[in-house]
Amino acid sequence: MATPKGFARAIIVLTTVTAAVMELIDTSIVNVALNDMSGSLGVNIEDISWVITSYAIANVIIIPLTGFLAEYFGRKNYYITSMIIFTLASYMCAQSTSLIEIIIWRFVQGVGGGALLSTSQAILFDAFEPKDRPMASGLFGMGLVLGPTLGPTLGGYIIDHASWPLIFMINIPIGIIATLLSFYFIEQKEQEGKNKKNIHIDYNGIILLAAGIGCLQYVLERGESEDWFNSESIRICSIIAAVGLVTFIIYELNIKSPAVNLRVLSNRNLAFTTVFTFVAGFGLFTSVFVYPVLAQRVLGFTAYETGYSLLLPTMAAVVMMPVIGKTMSKGVTPVPFVFIGFILFAVYSVLSASVSPDVGKNDFFIPLVIRAVGISLCQLPLINQAVAGLEPKDYAAGISLNNMIRQLGGAFGIAMANNYVANRYAYHRTNIVSTMQNGAEQANNIAQGIAAKTGDAVTAANKALAVMNASVERQSYYLSYLDTFRLIAIFFIAVIPFVMFLRVKKKSAAEQAAAMKAAAESH
């Protein structure tokens, strides 16, 4: 198949990067809409976070299967079908009227979206000659950073000027246009989808993985609110999670064509890289989840102000990503990038854990710039490091596993953040209430002030208690979110010493091209 040129290549670049950005926007666009969605659907903020985690779980499940499905149905057919699934699910999310309904459609959306991200990169790389693929990597890397950054900003603007269903409806025209452009401009490779009889799909492994991760996620999400193992559903799901994941590992290690090739983890370099990748996913997704909720629930930012405060600092990562990609293509070792990136992310978390309750909208700018630079230093280097020391035939498996671990780290991070915030909130509230002095006198003074302004002495006492309770609640949440940032910092600091276990094998130009190609096909 000839490499496209000129206008055709420009359309492919526009289509694939837009599709990937659209998918990535949906990983974070709902973060600033959680308060509105929880109120509209009549659920609490912890329950509505399933809208995020169901999407992430679907991504985790579909990423290892993308190579199978693209080969089975043909990459172009699979890409277009996934885009249609994503677009249709976006419409159904917007029409949802219950928590269960929107969780189901977000899962379906994640199934389509995970394929968009993976296949977009493969198609984009095929549009460039091998010598020009660092440029393609830089273009796609900009999209990887820009998507999650645009999400909160775009979502905030929509929440401030419309209603939350529009955050899903905006995908529909984009999805339709991208589908039509893909149909007319992306070429179908020869033999695509014609070797189905020779392709084995590991259905048992998929089922075990989905059951294990799904039940584990339920335990993490609902454990706090259901009193952990005093709940029968938590006990049952814990057993299914443990049995499912252990069986999955044993089964995948003992079959010829596993859905997830765990045998590549025998490579020490990849094994340690997955640790870094898990923590990177944990920090990346958790920080994007915790910061908007802190800004809105405690600091009083509007949804748009929250998103906008994220956008400008993160443009630093957009600028750096292609530069890092070009540097990496010259054979520069990724270890210093990862080391500095993790330190910067820990610094960001520590700085965020030190803000005062009256912090202004611009006071997060420097910490968020530090976060953005840290992200840019981690993303491409970790993808490269995942294949260092692997045989070319194992590149796809190594990168696919690495990407799955990143998504899984994000899902774990959000669930743990929810539970940690709830636990720390209860702790801090108890401490604040127990140390309050002259509480009755303060309530009486507030009540007198309210009565003087409104002339309603009957309800003034209840209003005074409500004011004091709101103050205690705000302070308790403020302290609990700062504790969560400290937890993120601890995770990053804890894995930094493992950098010494990473080894770097200098690859030839041919091996680097093969690695980038594998990254494209399994991202």
Image: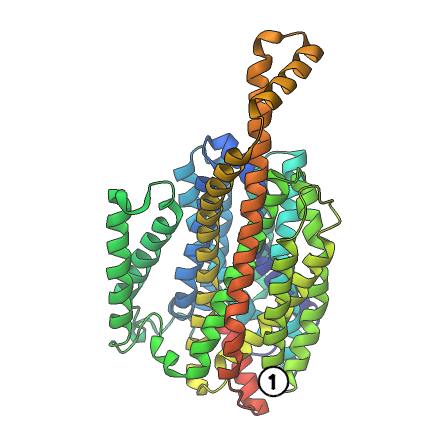
- Name the amino acid type tagged 1: Thr
Residue 175 shows in the view: no
Residue at the front extreme of this rendering: 438
In this view, the residue in front, 206 or 460, is 460
Q: In percent of the image, x 41 and y 55: which residue is there? A: 57
Q: Residue furthest right?
A: 362
Q: Is residue 16 above or below residue 511?
A: above
Q: Position of residue 160 (x, y in %)?
A: 67, 36
Is 289 in front, or is 21? Answer: 289
Packing grade of label 1 (10 A; few <14, some 14-19, many >=20) is: some
Counting labels gives 1
Q: Dividing the image into 4 quarters, which one contains the N terminus?
A: bottom right
Where is residue 286 drawn, in percent x and y?
A: 53, 55
Q: Quadrant of residue 231?
A: top left
Looking at the picture, how far across and down is residue 408, in whole percent?
A: 44, 61
Q: Residue at x 73, y 45 (%)?
A: 361
> Where does label 1 land, which residue?
333
Q: Is residue 204 above or below residue 161?
A: below
Position above or below: 33 against 350: above
Would residue 508 be found to the left or right of residue 315 on screen? left
- On the image, the x and y values in percent for residue 15 come to 61, 61
